[in-house]
Amino acid sequence: MNSLSTLDVKYVKGIGPKKAELLASELGIRTAADLLRYYPNNYVDRSKCYTVSELNGEIPYVQIRGSFIAMNVVGEGAKMRLAASFTDGRRTMEVVWFRKIKQIRESIRLGQEYILFGKPTRYGSMWQMAHPEIDAPQSVGAREGFRGIYPLTEKLRSRGVISRNFFVWTQAVLESRTVADPIPQSVAQSIGLMPLDSALRQIHLPSSAELLEKARYRLKFDELFYIQLDIVRRGRLRHDNTEGYRFRRIADWFNNFYNRCLPFPLTDAQKRVVKEIRADVNTGRQMNRLVQGDVGSGKTIVALMAMLMAVDNGFQACLMAPTEILATQHYETLSAMTAEIGLNIELLTGSTRTAKRKDIHTGLRDGSLHILVGTHALIEDTVEFANLGLAVIDEQHRFGVAQRARLWRKNLLPPHILVMTATPIPRTLAMTVYGDLDVSVIDQLPPGRKPVTTLLRYDNQRQGTYKAVFNQLRMGRQAYIVYPLIDENEKLDLRSLQEGFETIRQTFPDYKVAMVHGRMKPDEKDYQMQLFASGEARILVATTVIEVGVNVPNASVMIIENAERFGLSQLHQLRGRVGRGADQSYCVLMTKYQIASETRKRLEVMTATTDGFVIAEADMKFRGPGDIEGTMQSGMPFDLHIASLATDGAILQQARLAAEKLLDSDPDLKMPQNSDMIRYMSTIVNRSADWSKIS
C-alpha cells in the first residue's frame, strides 16, 4: 500500500479537491490508503429484493426493484423537495429528496427499471424512502450480496455525501491496481492470512459471509501486528541499549527493614515481584517495570523495598504521586514503617513552605536525604539529587508523558523506573499500552484481609440501608458516602453532595459528619480528611476525590449514590477505600430502580466479584477500550480502524507472538524480505517520540 499512501485522495475518481478537503477535515482521509482503511461499520444482504407489500419496518435497509411513474417538485425555498412515486408493479411507495433536486430530477427516467436501496419509513398510510441509492439493474452498485454501510458525520450528509459514495470510491481505487502485501510471506503463511489485496476487496464488497470474516481477521491482525512490532522492537532496543545503574548488594537498610519493620509477612506474590525487581536492578540495564496490584495488595511495601535497594547501593530514590493527598499518604506510610531504622524521608508538594523546601533541596544535594516523596513538584528544575537511582511513579497514567520524561534528567544515567498502578488493566490493553514494560502482578491480598461484600440497592431500600450503616457506626466503625455531583443540577436527576450532607447530618444526628470535595482549598480539605482519619468524624461525605490516597482501616461501609453514573473501574477504586482493616466491610451501590438492563448487568458485575482484573475486562467490554485508552495510553503507535482491544484479545496475542518471532530472526528488521513491511510501517506508525523509555 506504499504507493497508495502517497496518492492524494482528490485524484481518486469521483472525489476531486472540494470533497477531498471535506474528507480530510471530517474523517482524516487524505490519501487513497486512508480511504481503503475507512471500513464499513455494518453490512446488509443485497441478495434479496423486497416488494412494497413486504415492508414492515423491522428491516432497517431494503432494496426494491421497480420504476418511477411520477415525479414533482413540492414547496418552495428551504422547504422545497422532490417527491416521486415508485412502483414494484403491484404497489406504490413515495420517494423524496431534499437536496440536489435538479440533478436527481434530470438523471431519472420515468418508466425505466431501477433498484432502490435505502431505509423505509411509514408516512401516514404510505411507505416512504428518503434519499435512496439508485442503481440500474446491470450496474456494479446493484450487485447481489453484501454491501457495506459506512459511518457518516452530519456534515458529510449535509454536503450530499452518502454511504454509496465510499463504496464507489473504494471500488475505483481497487479496480485501478493490485495492492501489494507488505507482511512477509513467512508471517502470512504461518498464520494462514488472506492476502491484503483480497482482504481489502472483501471488506468493502464481500462475496460471502465467510470471506468477509477472513478479511476482517486479516485487517485486524495487521493493525495489532504493527502495533506489537513497534512496541516489542522499541522495548528490546531500550533494554539492550539503555545503560542503567547496577545495585550490586542487599545490605543493612534492606535487611533491617525486612527483619525488624515489616508490618506483616510478605505474600508469595510480593516476594515474587521483589525478586523480579532485584534481578532487574542488578543487570546494568535500566529497569522499566510496571507493578499491577489490586487495591490493598501491598504495592507500597514492594516499592519501599525497591527504594531500599537503591539506598543500600549509595543511591537516592523518589516516589511521585498524582495528588497531594496521595503523596502525603505515601509519605506518612513510608515514614511510619521505617521509623525504627532511621531512614531519612521527606515530602515535597506545592504546599511545602519555603524554609522546608530549602532544607529538602540541601539534603538532596548533599545526599543525606534518602527518599523524596512528592507530586509534580519533584520534576521542577530546582529539585537536584546527588545520585538518583530509582524513580517510583504511582498511578502514572495521571501524569503527562513529558512530565514523566523529566525524571530522566535527574542524573547522568536515567534512573530505574518502577511504575505502580492500583487500576487493574485488561490484559489486551496492558500488552498494547504498556507492551514495552516488564510487567509484574501482585495477585494476592495480605493475610487477614476479607473481601468486601458488595450490594446493589435501590432508592426505595434507602431506609434499610441507613439502618445497616447505623449498626456499623454503633459498633465503632466509620462510613463513606460518595456523591457524583457537588451541587444540585436541574438538568441532571442526580443526588448532590451539598444536599446529601444535610440529609446525612439529619439522619445520623449523634455522629460528626465531615465533607470533602474537589473545590475545597487544600487546607480545608486536609482538615476535613484529618477529622475522618482520626475518627473524630465517623462519616465522610465526599465526591470521587477519595478514589485514591485515603487509608482509614476503621471504615467498613461505602455507599455510592447514583452508582450507575460511574464506570466499573472507578467503582472498584472507590470500593477499595473500605476493607482495609480486619473487619468485614460493605460497599452499597445505590441507584434508581428504573435503569437500563445493560446498566443493571454492569452493576451486577460489581456484586459478583472483587477481582479487579475481571472487573477491568468487563469494563472494557461494556464501554469499549476508548475511554480506558484515553486515561492510560501515552501515545498509541497508530489508530485502530477495525481491531478492538475489548474483543480481539486472541488476535492480539497471535500478533504479539508473530512480532516476537520475526524480531528473533531479524532484530534490526534489515533483511530484504522485510523491507516492504518497514516502508509501509513508516507510513502508518505515529510516533513523535520514543515514550517506551518512560511509561
Image (tube, grey):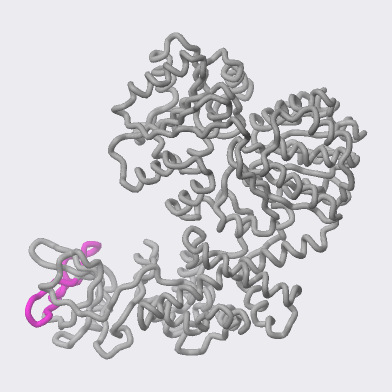
Q: Is residue 237 left or right of residue 199?
A: right
Quadrant location, the N terminus = bottom right
Q: Nearer the viewer, residue 311 or 267?
A: 267
Seen from the viewer's position, the closer of residues 198 and 63 is 198
Does any portion of residue 680 appear in the rendered image? Answer: yes
Q: Position of residue 69 (x, y in %)?
A: 11, 81
Question: Residue 183's quadrant in the figure?
Answer: bottom right
When the figure is inspected, residue 523 is found, relative to residue 607, above or below; the finding is above
Above-or-below relation of 446 to 461? below
Count of all numbered marks drawn on residues in the image: 0
In the image, what residue occupies the spot 61% across and 84% down?
185
In x, y percent, where is residue 650? 52, 65
The image shows residue 582, relative to residue 681, as above or below, that is above
Q: Which residues are magenta?
A: 70-95
Residue nearest the observer in this picture, 16 or 148 = 148
Q: Residue 81: say if magenta.
A: yes
**SS assignment for the magenta stretch, majority:** strand
Residue placed at 59% from the left, 34% from the top?
548
Q: State which quadrant residue 399 falls in.
A: top right
Residue pictured at 56% horizontal, 58% vertical: 428
Q: Residue furthest top?
A: 510
Q: Is residue 503 magenta?
A: no
| Residue 155 location (% of width, % of height) | 39, 63
Q: In the picture, residue 393 is in which quadrant?
A: top right
